[in-house]
Amino acid sequence: MSLSHKDVAKILEIIDQSHYTEILLEVDDLKLRVSRSKGEESLLTPATTSGIEGANVAAQQTALAVERRTAQAAATATVGSGSGESLQEAVEIRAPLTGRFFRAASPGARPFVEIGMEVKSDDQVCLIEAMKLFHSVSAGVVGTVVAILVENAQVVETGQVLVKISPTTTKR
Amino acid sequence: MIRRVLVANRGEIAVRIIRTCKEMGLETVAIYSAADRSSLHVRYADRAVCVGRAPALESYLNVDAILGAAHLTEADAIHPGYGFLAENAEFAAECCRWNLHFIGPNPEVIRMMGNKIAAREIAKKAGVPTVPGSEASVLDLVQAEKLCRELGFPILLKAASGGGGRGIRVVDKPDNLARDLATCQREATAAFGEGSIYVEKLIANARHVEVQVLGDQHGHCIHLGERDCSVQRSKQKLLEEAPCVVISDGLRQELFTAALAITRQIGYDNAGTIEFLVDRETEKFYFLEMNTRLQVEHPVTEALTGIDIVEQQIQVAAGAVLALRQEDIQFRGHAIEFRINAEDPAKGFLPNPGQITDAIFPGGPGIRVDTFCHSGSTIPPYYDSLLAKVVAHADTRERALNRLKAALEMTDIKGIATTIPLFFEFLEMYAFQSNQFNVFWVDNLFRGEK
């Protein structure tokens, strides 16, 4: 299944009018996660089941139109290749080595990044533990986190895409 | 009497322990995690029990699962190897409670020496000098600053519950003390469950020299000589040799006397290692810490003395009187061990787990290889990076180095990057050939490369 730019725009419109802060859609092999929260801990865990999952009902109506750009970027990255060429291309953060992927410094700690979070180039996005050593992986780019593709504590292979970041275009 | 030994470890050390058990006619039980199902120690042991999933916390550190495995297989002894539960006093005590011989010292000395501040106190009581530093854990920044002014920078911050080179931080100047103390406390709490820190003066031109000791439950103890482990990267040993040829015989005897004084002081009753720093400028030595377990580099001592340290461990753990007397111990020749790790020296020692597609190891007189690797074996990312230890033994240091070089040229590991190229570089370096280096040599070599 593919998703056109028009579909993305439609979904964003729906979300803009809803009172949800985050929405996750999963149809076949397509995952779409849209979030308007900024830096807040996600109440949604990555979906493992098929179908459509609901989101938390948050009392944040006032913050409605805030993160339109974030949501738009999120949609772009998860749509995948081939579509949405008019939108900013997401940068893929890949595993520099094989090991276990950790989203936070320790169990129970706040994750380094969440979807929708803005990051600076040297911000840490995750840890990879290999052979009793922890390797910090940084964003390497200024932008917004649009996808986190690996579940916490899973083993990742060298070169595997971990996180996608939509770079912020500097104004000229 | 011990008949069936459960080896609570993996990798090369599990294979090495099983080898001695077989020689002694003892049955062996291997434990393994889901990631190690086809590992060599599992194939070598008489029986094997899966104790959990791949992460060490769920398997090799899972005390209940391991005790359960011992119960199911009717093992009567547990050898912890090194790492994992080897220096866990609670585990040793649990083994005793379940009437299993713990092949290591009694739980009380593990506990005593596990706290590095307490260990320094014990050394002082035994009349052994310790590195100048704090008497107890530093409580706050004010106290740390006062202490550091007295000692003079650079200083070391060390976690009281650390050890094995972990939980240590160098502070170069007063400006960094506040930040580094906070980081060190936080890291120690995360890694060891408690964050007490002590301060030591940094000795710039130092060698790391350690003494292998052996005690029994009847108050006897001997030493098996020293090892020089000064070639370290980020406090992790890369190679070890014996004897330490840069110290005088007089100093060597002082180290032996000091090591035995500590061993006696605590009633140490198995194989252990007492680590010292030797200041090359002053020829003074200082107690660092004691490792209450079998050491990675024990084969170097076995080469010089001809003694199987694991065999001695098993016998004294069963309650036997130490069969060796000090005057029986002869030291012959020179031995050097290179640790082959799954790390890429060209990429800042990045760990390199994966599949070994081809593995050829050396042999011949005076060469010993301790490994669990073979063509086709998978090196999981969950555990430490040690693949193999290649040990050369010859009459002199020079001949041992020649032998080791030839052996490494006949070693070929394909599929994953290893530290072998690093050793070829060392062998070409004058500082290494002429034995003129200190514990910071390797770190200084790589400084600026990152």
Image: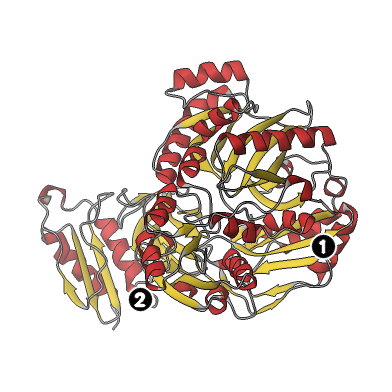
CB-based contact (under 8 Å), mark 1 and mark 2: no
Callout 1: SS: helix
In the picture of the structure, the residue carrying the numbered disc 1 is B404
- Specify the amino acid type for callout 2: Ser
Say left or right for A161 vs A108.
Answer: right
User: Residue at (21%, 72%) from the top-left corner?
Assistant: A25
Tally the numbered discs.
2
Label ID, residue A83: 2
Badge 1: few (under 14), some or many (20 or more) residues near its Cα, within 10 Å?
many
Q: How is the image coloured?
A: secondary structure
* Residue at image point 54% right, 28% down: B121
Give the chain of mark 1.
Answer: B
Badge 2 local density, few (<14 within 10 Å), some, or many (20+)?
Answer: some
The chain letter under disc 2 is A
Q: Secondary structure at mark 2?
A: loop
The correct choice, above or below, for B412 with respect to A131 in the image is below
Type of residue at label 1? Leu
Using the rendered image, report if marks 1 and 2 lie on a common chain: no
Residue B265: give x, y in percent of width and height. 58, 34
Examine the rendered structure and indicate whether residue B265 appears above or below residue A21: above
Residue at 72% from the left image edge and 68% from the top image edge? B369
Q: Nearer the viewer, residue B260 or B398?
A: B260
| Residue at the spot 50% in from the left edge and 21% down from the top edge | B144
